[in-house]
Image: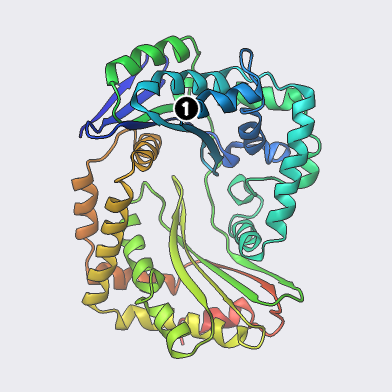
Amino acid sequence: MSVKLHTLSNGFRIVTERQDTLESAAIGVWIMAGARHERVEQNGIAHFLEHMAFKGTEKRSSLEIAQALENVGGYLNAYTSREATAYYARVLKEDVSLALDVLGDIVLNPVFDPKEIETERGVILSEIGQAQDTPDDVIFDWLQEVSYPEQALGRTILGPAERVKSFSREDLSGFVKEQYSPDRMVLSAAGNIDHDQLIKEAEALFGHLKPSGERIVEPAQFKGGEYRKVKDLEQAHFALSFEGPGYRDEDIYIAQTATTALGGGMSSRLFQEIREKHGLCYTIYAQSVAYGDAGTTTIYAGTSGDDIAALSELTFDEIARSADLMQKAEVDRARAQIKAGMLMGLESPSSRAERNARMIGIWGRVPDLSETVGKIDAVSLENVQNFLSHLQQAKVSLALYGPVKEAPELAALQARLSA
C-alpha cells in the first residue's frame, strides 16, 4: 500500500492509497468548508447544502442520484462537520469512475430546485427538533457554545431553526461560490483504484474551477463558562471541557494519551472510580476533541438527580489526583488502545480515504502510519502527568441538563482541582 498525492494547477488535490487485495474502493470529495466558515447569518447553511446535493443536479434527478450507485451495489453518503463537508461513496473497483462522476455532479451541479429546498427544509427542521429532544446530543452543542462564545466554532452545525427557515436559493448558491473552491477540495480514494486514471477523470471534472486563494478564518478562542438547564428528565447529563491542543500542535498525542488513560475505557480512572467503585453512573467517558487550531479534553457522564453533586465532585477530584497518581502501566495501556483503535479502523478503505483527506486538509500531506505510531509511542508518563497538571489551571466549561439543581457551581468544582 502506498499513498500518492497530486495537485491540479488550480489547487485541487487528489490523494490515493491503493489496496490491491480488495475488490472495492472508497472515494469522496472533502471540502474544507464547514460550520466554522459560516457567518452568523449563514449558520446551518453548510449542512443545508449537504442535504441539497442529493436533491437533483443538471443531469440527474434525486431518484437518479440514489439509483446511480445502488444499481451497482454501492452507496453514497455525506456529512458536515465544523471544519469540512464530505461527499463519499463505496463501490466495487470497476465502478470507481461512475462514483467519481456522481460525486462531481452533486458537488458541482446542484440545481437547488425551490420545491426541493422547501422539502429538505422540513427534513432539517425535524433533524434539529430531534437533536434538541436528545439530551446527550444537545448538551454537547451547549458545551461548545459556552466554550467558544460568539464565535463560529461555538455555533451548532445544524444551525438554529429560525435561520434554516429563512435560507433561500441565493443563500445556498452564494455559500458555494464563497467556499467551494478547488484549493479547498480534496479528492481522496482508497482501495483497488488507479491513481493515474483518477487524475485524468478529476482533471476533466474539476480542472476548470477557479481557486479563491487564502481566506480569513476566525481564530478559536476557548473562553470557558457554565451552562445549566434544569428540566424534569430521567437522567442528569454532565459534560465538561478543558482547553486543549489542536491537530497541528505536537501535544495532541499527549492529550489523546492522557484523555484515554483518564476516561477512555472500562479500565480508565474515571470509569473505575465513578462507576465501578461508587456506582454513580452507567456511562462516563473522556475524549480528546481537536480542530486545526484548538481542542478540548471533554468528559461526559449521565447520572441521577440525586447523584449529580457527588458525581461532579468526584470527577474533579479524580482529575486532580490523576496528575500525581497516574502510573506508567496506565500510560502504556492508553497508548496501546490508541494505536490499536487507529490501526484496526484503517482496515476499512473508507477509513483510509477519510484519514488521508483529513491529513491533507490539516497538514497538506499524509504522515506515514509509522510516523504517527512513533509519536504515540514517544508519549511518556511524565508528559501525561504534566498534561494532567495543566488541566488544573486550564480554562474549563461545564454544561448540565436535567435534574441538575443540586450540582455545584463551576467555580466550586474548579477549586477542588487545587485543593
Where disc 1 sits, the SS reads: helix
Q: Count residues near mark 1 (Cα–Cα under 10 Å), then give few for <14, some for 14-19, many for 20+.
A: many
Residue 143, by quadrant, is: bottom right
Q: Position of residue 340 (x, y in %)?
A: 27, 58
Q: Which residue is mark 1?
A: 184
User: Which residue is nearer to you in this view: 91 or 295?
Assistant: 91
Residue 391, by quadrant, is: bottom left
User: Which residue is nearer to you in this view: 228 or 189?
Assistant: 189
Left or right: where 132 falls relative to 199: right
Residue drawn at x 60%, y 60% is: 140
Please say whether residue 22 is visible from this viewpoint: yes
Left or right: where 175 falls relative to 116: left
Q: Position of residue 46 (x, y in %)?
A: 62, 35
What amino acid is labelled 1 in the image?
A: Arg
Residue drawn at x 29%, y 79% is: 326
Q: Position of residue 357 (x, y in %)?
A: 38, 35
User: Which residue is nearer to you in this view: 11 or 205?
Assistant: 205
Residue 129 in the image: above or below residue 215: below
Residue drawn at x 62%, y 17% is: 60
Q: Position of residue 206 (x, y in %)?
A: 46, 15
Residue drawn at x 46%, y 51% is: 294
Instruction: Identify the image's colour scheme: rainbow, by chain, secondary structure or one colour.
Output: rainbow
Please say whether residue 217 is visible from this viewpoint: no
